[in-house]
Image (cartoon, grey):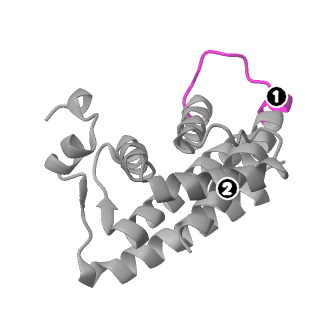
Amino acid sequence: MRDTELKTYENFKNAGIIEILNPAEKGRYVDFLRKSYENDIEHCKFILFKFPRWSIISAYYAMHNISKLFLAEKYNIKISKKGVHRATIVAMGSVINEDALKTKIIRLLQEADKIYEFVNPRDWNIIKYLVKGRKEREKTQYYTGSAFNEQLLLKNAHEILNEIAKPYLKIIKELMK
């Protein structure tokens, strides 16, 4: 199956990118993802002012890894191989459509709206945060053709950490309880 055909949960599953997590592997996989997202967000904060470009990249990877952790813990889903970023977004999109989860997400967004400036509790689709994080990471990680502006990069890194990554991580952690 070509990469361009991988658009649905079933396509990713058929390609072996999304699979059921082997119970014997689950403990190690979950521990790895938990430590990865925790390291990524700490790294993001630690290097924010000195290396804002890498801070943005680490913020996204914290979001990506906590998403995979959520899928592994709650749904026994393992995602690996080529296409892992898109597959994670697709898998998250498929599970958050459950009514009980939607209700909880809306409540969590309403709480987050009191803390974070850019949170919109009327838009329950938290996958938009993950997609935005991925786009920002890609813009930052790969040459975009724009002039390099350290101050703008620092401002973007600060906004991505505080208005995208932190609310997303907080909501996903609550969903894992």
Which quadrant would the C terminus be assigned to in this image?
bottom right
- Residue 165 at what x, y percent from top left? 67, 50
Residue for point 67% across, 61% down? 170
Residue for point 67% across, 38% down? 122
Camera-nearest residue between 124 and 43: 124
- Residue 138 at what x, y percent from top left? 54, 33
- Residue 72 at what x, y percent from top left? 38, 68
Camera-nearest residue between 124 and 30: 124
Q: Which mark is residue 152?
A: 1
Q: CA distance from mark 2 to mark 1?
A: 33 Å
Q: Which mark is residue 124?
A: none
Residue for point 37% across, 43% down? 90
Left or right of 171? Residue 50 is right
Which contiguous range is marked in magenta? 141-153
Camera-nearest residue between 115 and 30: 115
Left or right of 80? Residue 122 is right
Q: Specify the amino acid type for callout 1.
A: Leu
Residue for point 86% across, 31% down? 151
| Above/below status of 87 relative to 135 | below
Looking at the rendered structure, the secondary structure element under dot 2 is: helix
Q: Magenta stretch: residue 155 in it?
A: no
Q: Residue 12 lies in what quarter of the image?
A: top left
Q: Which mark is residue 107?
A: 2
Q: Specify the amino acid type for callout 2.
A: Arg
Instruction: Judge whether residue 47 can be spotted in this image.
Output: no
Left or right of 73? Residue 52 is right
Looking at the rendered structure, the secondary structure element under dot 1 is: helix
Instruction: Judge whether residue 129 can be spotted in this image.
Output: yes
Q: Earlier in the sequence, mark 2 or mark 1?
A: 2
Is the magenta region chiefly helix, strand or loop? loop
Q: Magenta stretch: residue 148 in it?
A: yes
